[in-house]
Amino acid sequence: MQKRNTIQRQLVISAVRSLSNHPTAEEVYNRIVLDYPDISKGTVYRNLNSLVDSGLLHRVSVPSSADRYDHMLTKHYHVQCVKCHRFMNVDDLDYFQDLDDKIAQMTGYRMENHNIVFQGVCPECQIEELEAKKREVEQAKAEGRKPDKISKKL
């Protein structure tokens, strides 16, 4: 049985596409409710699940975080900043089908895909960290004390 293409489904797809940050269900709801204040969270959540089940959206499970939704249906990877939680596609990196094939061979499973989210510190947060460390050093100098060692991660 094919799902009807209701206005709610269209609103959800449109919101996911317009929020190019791989939005959470809450972010999708918050976007839609701006223009359609009578829509319920339940309607948004049900439609997200339905769109995932029908293959029109992808759900990206993120450890220790809310699931995110992606309108890009080709297989690809993601990266998330551990500081600001920015989430984006990793472009120009081929999907490693060999990994699916090897896991299938080892386990006997039929692989549908794999979901890898790389985690790190984005360039903007790296700059903020460096500026914070510089301020810390300047403050220590102004107070006449020896600055703490600068982290190797910076």
Image (cartoon, rainbow, N blue to C red):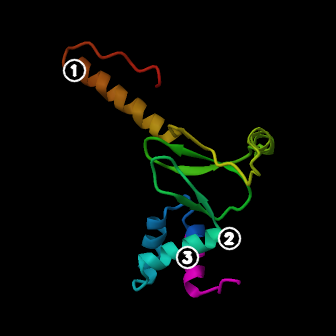
What amino acid does circle 1 point to? Ala
Label for residue 142? Answer: 1
- Point out residue 31 in the picture as x, y percentages from the top left corner: 46, 72
Residue 9 colored magenta? yes
Give the SS element for disc 2.
Answer: loop
Residue 52 colored magenta? no
Nearer to us in this view, 110 or 31 = 110
Give the SS element for disc 3.
Answer: helix
Nearer to us in this view, 133 or 18 = 18
Question: Do the residues under discs 2 and 1 have CB atoms within 8 angstroms?
Answer: no
Residue at the limit of the structure toward the left, as seen here? 143
Q: Which residue is mark 3?
A: 47
Left or right position of 84 against 91: left
Q: CA distance from mark 2 to mark 1?
A: 58 Å
Task: Specify few, some or many for label 3: CA neighbours under 10 Å numbering under 14, 14-19, or 20 or more.
Answer: some
Left or right position of 129 against 13: left
Residue shown at 49%/72% (left/top)? 45
Residue shown at 74%/55% (left/top)? 112
Q: Is residue 114 above or below residue 67?
A: above
